[in-house]
Image: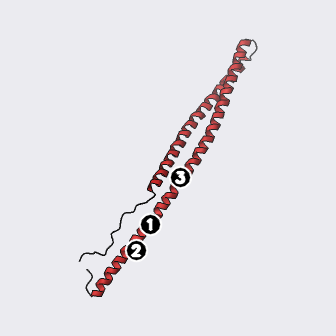
Amino acid sequence: MPMEGIVETPSFTFRLERVRTIRARAEERAREALSSELRARARDEAQLHDALATVAAARDVGRAAATPGRTSAVDFLSAQAYLERAERRRAEASLELSRRDAEVAARRQVLAAAARDRQAIDKLKERRRAEHDAEWARRSQNALDELALAIHRRGGPAA
């Protein structure tokens, strides 16, 4: 005997799938932007370390130039100019690293917000899927119950 009363479960479709996809892409873009900023920060940090090394070298040159009788006034002025340039470069590198740190923090906040948005719609999707599955399980059980009742009423054996 065919089971005509059994309900076939349709596949689940989430009507907000396009929104979920857009949010997932936004999160991925935010992750890529953060990654890019972190690479730039690492580069800026290396430049600051280089600038600090240059300042240390310039100070050494300045100390050597300050030795009386061994260097001329021109050498001393050159060493002083070198130290000042190195200090400016260090200050600029430090400022750029601070700016980059602020940008990294902002990108992290954007990523966190994008991740929250995506997680919210993912939870909604899972909740809707669970509701869909529960509804179709209930319908299937009702159909089976009706079939069992019909067989029972006819007094026939279960097929």
Disc sitting over residue 84 in the figure: none
For marks 3 and 2, give the one nearer the viewer.
2
Q: Check disc 1 and report the residue beneath it.
A: 130
Q: Check disc 2 and report the residue beneath it.
A: 138
Residue type at mark 1?
Ala
Q: Quadrant of the C terminus?
A: bottom left
The answer to which of 29 and 47 lies nearer the viewer is 29
Tell me, yes or no, whether the two marked residues, 3 and 2, touch with CB atoms within 8 Å: no
The residue shown at (43%, 64%) is 129
Where residue 62 sits in the image (x, y, percent)? 71, 20
Where residue 10 sits in the image (x, y, percent)? 35, 65
Are there few (<14), some (14-19), or many (20+) residues within 10 Å of tag 2? few
At numbered mark 1, what does the secondary structure look like: helix, strand or loop?
A: helix
At numbered mark 2, what does the secondary structure look like: helix, strand or loop?
A: helix
The residue shown at (65%, 37%) is 98
Calculate the distance from the C-alpha at mark 2 to the C-alpha at mark 1. Answer: 12 Å
At numbered mark 3, what does the secondary structure look like: helix, strand or loop?
A: helix
Q: Indicate the quadrant where residue 71 lies.
A: top right
Where residue 16 sits in the image (x, y, percent)? 46, 57
Calculate the distance from the C-alpha at mark 3 to the C-alpha at mark 2. Answer: 34 Å
Residue type at mark 3?
Ala
Q: Check disc 3 and report the residue beneath it.
A: 115
Residue type at mark 2?
Arg
Calculate the distance from the C-alpha at mark 1 to the C-alpha at mark 3. Answer: 22 Å
Image check: 21 left or right of 99?
A: left
Q: Earlier in the sequence, mark 1 or mark 3?
A: 3
Q: Earlier in the sequence, mark 2 or mark 1?
A: 1
Image check: 95 left or right of 29?
A: right
